[in-house]
Amino acid sequence: MSLGKVRAWPGRPVWVLCVIGLLMAGCGDGEKSSQKNQASAASAKPAQVETVAPMDLTLEREYPAKIRSDLSADIVARVSGVLEKQLYTPGDTVEKGQTLFIIEQAQYKAAVEQARADVESARATLENNRRDYERYNELYKQRSVSQQQRDSALSAYRTARASVAQAQAALDDAQISLDYTTVKAPVSGRVGLNEVNVGNYVAVQTELTTVTPLDPLEVRFALPQSDAFALRRQRTDDPESIKASLEFPYADQSGSTDTSLKGTLNFLGSRVDDTTSTVQARAVFKNPGDLFLPGLFVRVKLLGVKHYSALAVPEVAVTEGLKGPQLYILNDKDVIENRFVSLGEQAGGWVVISDGLAKGDRVVVSAIGSVSPGDKIKPQAFDGQPATTPTDPSGKNGASTHQAMQGTSISGQDTQKDAPSQQQDQ
């Protein structure tokens, strides 16, 4: 506005016109600011956001273990003599009480007959001394014999009675030795190779073979004390919630045979080992088909294990940054900030964050490949549908799991490739 025009308006002071000019300029700046805010809002990218809150997750945990047969028995000779017979074929399944070996019996049968004769002799002596005592007792009552004579008869009678008991014990011992010449299986199970051939002399405690029950089997393993504490708490609340699973380590060589066993956790130790800070545990499994064998090193899997009050995010939200795993966190202005975190256990499509995350944090869980730190986000409610298929540690189900995760793994691989399809889902 020129001064000439100012003079052309009579009665209008110059300062009034200046105020009008400033107001017009201010209105222009307000319009620009509003347009900028509208442009910023229009440029905000839609993405699903999960607000972090403690939750209870169901996990699977694996531990190295060794299979045992709790009832396995070493068969040893309990008497000495020549091994006369072997009544089984190595590798057979035998029943409890089945005869496996015969050790020569002649000398033990003779010992039994001798002991039986000693018992009869002792009983005859006892009967004779009993009659003497009764006779002396009647004569004593008639004052025909002295008290000393009656007491001597009573003492002889009691000695004879003790001799009968002693002879009977010797007979029982001889019979036990004779019975030991017939070596029987103390348990049902698979019998091993014979350690001594027929015709050889065996001494007492000579190992003859082994009988190993293969169904059921037990697996013993050690738990970190933190895991043991959580399991003890869970078993107190719900004893039947924890199951055990065992996968055959050579499953690829078994063809179409079922190579997994289901069992129960039936023991959890009551003390922590001072040297390893672990707690002993045991699981028992039925073993149909005798596929698993004692001594086999395996990994036992505990199913249905609870992680209480965990801070977890959908696995799809985790990417790999320059310094390790990271999350995209929304600040109070809905702008993305990256945060490096430490990963814990995985439960289906959820990952426990052991460090770097707090209750109430807002985590971007979709369109990860199409956003970056500094981007403005238009938050959308999380649909609550992360992949539910747990990652198989063996890698057998890796392809299907990866597909369920929409192509985004913890390592961040394939994120960029699948980002467009994720964005279309929004």
Image: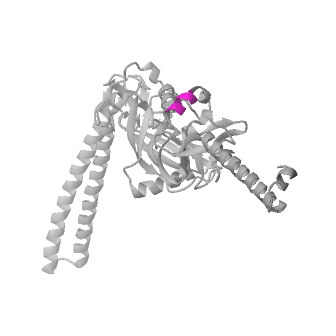
- Residue 172 image position (x, y, % from top left): 28, 48
Residue 116 visible: yes
Q: Left of 78 or right of it: where is 379?
A: right
In the rendered image, which quarter is residue 319 located in?
A: top right
Residue appearing at x 28%, y 36% in the figure: 97
Q: Nearer the viewer, residue 273 or 203?
A: 273
Colour style of the rendered protein structure: one colour
Q: Left of 206 or right of it: where is 146?
A: left
Residue appearing at x 45%, y 38% in the figure: 388
**Number of on-image labels:** 0
Chief secondary structure of the magenta portion: helix
- Residue 166 image position (x, y, % from top left): 30, 55
- Residue 178 image position (x, y, % from top left): 30, 38
Residue 22 sits above or below residue 206 on the image: below
Q: Nearer the viewer, residue 231 or 8?
A: 8
Q: Which residues are magenta?
A: 418-424
Residue 351 visible: no
In the rendered image, which quarter is residue 110 located in?
A: top left
- Residue 415 image position (x, y, % from top left): 60, 30
Residue appearing at x 61%, y 44% in the figure: 41
| Residue 423 is covered by the magenta coloring | yes
Residue 148 sits above or below residue 418 on the image: below
